[in-house]
Amino acid sequence: MKTTKYLPQLVCVLAVLPCLPASAANELVLQLETALTRDTNPLRFTDQANTDPGLVSSAQKQTDTVAAADLRFGAIVPVLSDQTRLVLTGSLGNRHYKNYSQLDHQTGGADLAFDWVAGHALSGRLSAGKSKRLFQYINGSLTERDLSHEQRAGSDWRLRINNDFLLAASLSRSGLDYDLPVNQLYNFREHSKQAGLRYTSTTGSMLEGGLRWSDTEFPQRTEAQITQLDRAYKEREAYLDAEWNYSVKTVFSTHLGLIKRSYETLSERDTNLLNTIVRGTYLYSPQLRFDLQLFNRPFSIVDPAILYVQTKGIRLDSSWKYSPKLQWNASVLWQDSDQKLIPRFDTAAALQSRKEKLQRLGFGGSYLIDRGFRLFLDSAYERTQREADGVQLKQAIIKLGFEYTYENIAGSAARMGLNRYQQFYSATEATK
């Protein structure tokens, strides 16, 4: 089975890290977490599923309790200098559902990165990693367990022309595979490259312009699926990134991109897509911070009726450090989605796209009991409503947990990005 093959690779990094002598690594991190989560709608049934048994395949909508345990490691190992180094991280976790026992699974990831510097002008990073997690259920139409397996690798180069200008380039490849045959038509492989020229002012503000090329293919689609969804597409994006340090307390940044998407065989679906993200950060005080994000961007969805989705939204996050031990965070998200439907589902002009509205509220907090020991609360409420027929989906999640972190240098877990292995509910995920 795929899971059996995957576990040795997952624990490879985890097995190496504890064996590193303290003198071999500049920074070492060990993190343990255990938590209980109450989820009112794990399979994300729509409200209509309560009255229409045909929408429920093998389970009834019900609230469930999920027990979780996670182990995370990290290490920074210098090779030639503090700037030329290995960064190894890994995670392995277990999820147990009280009612939906078919969803019991292991989750985890492993990443290796090599940062290098050659003189003052040239630097870069080589990276590779794998991860697996539970499939993000959509509307209760699928009630079996499905796991997604992600692979990624990349290389980045930065050439400093002078104190103001930097030339940046990257190559990357990624892939995603699902366990269940019903979802395997969305298994994909993507190869991309990017190049840009960056200008940085004496105040720290930045402006970068460049191009991104990517090729995406879906190798396991049948001829019938290719007829409806195609087997591959190419994207070419011209982009402009900017960051403006307006003041010591206020920073603005933006990504403006125009994407030209070309399908391999169904050229009539070729389209231009807008990819725009605007962010603002305001530090009201050392204890209180606000983050605002506006976005208009495309993404894919695992639904055989939908080609792609264009979303517009606004997101606000806040964090309040009430005391050295106690802190709170809250978030709110409003999002409108325009789902571009597959032509064979278009029985009328009005059904060429389908619109949905999403509202999401999150609230969380943590209390530092002692150095390294933390209690935390994480919660969210989400409601999605489809405009055409009024179908709604609601979900409320509350998570209580305990975390222990050992760091030989304070802040190492954050510097290594161990939070990417965690799932947060109260803080909406940053748009990339």
Image: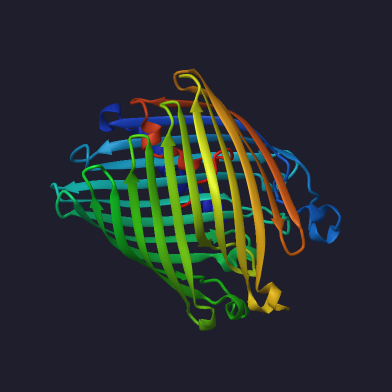
Q: What's the colour scheme?
A: rainbow
Percent position of residue 163, x then y: 16, 48
Image quarter for residue 227?
bottom right
Percent position of residue 113, x then y: 33, 47
Instruction: Using the image, determine if residue 104 lies above or below residue 342.
Output: above
Q: Between residue 339 and residue 175, name the one nearer to us.
A: 339
- The answer, for residue 35, to whether it is visible in the render is yes
Q: Does residue 155 appear to the left or right of 74 in the view shown?
A: left
Instruction: Using the image, determine if residue 127 lies above or below residue 405.
Output: below
Identified at 44% across, 52% down, the residue is: 278
Instruction: Using the image, determine if residue 167 lies above or below residue 268.
Output: above
Percent position of residue 100, x then y: 73, 45
Identified at 52% across, 50% down, the residue is: 132
Identified at 50% across, 34% down, the residue is: 71
Q: Between residue 92 and residue 47, name the one nearer to us.
A: 47
Percent position of residue 189, x then y: 46, 66
Q: Between residue 273 and residue 290, name the one nearer to us.
A: 290
Image quarter for residue 380?
top right
Identified at 59% across, 65% down, the residue is: 184
- The answer, for residue 18, to whether it is visible in the render is no
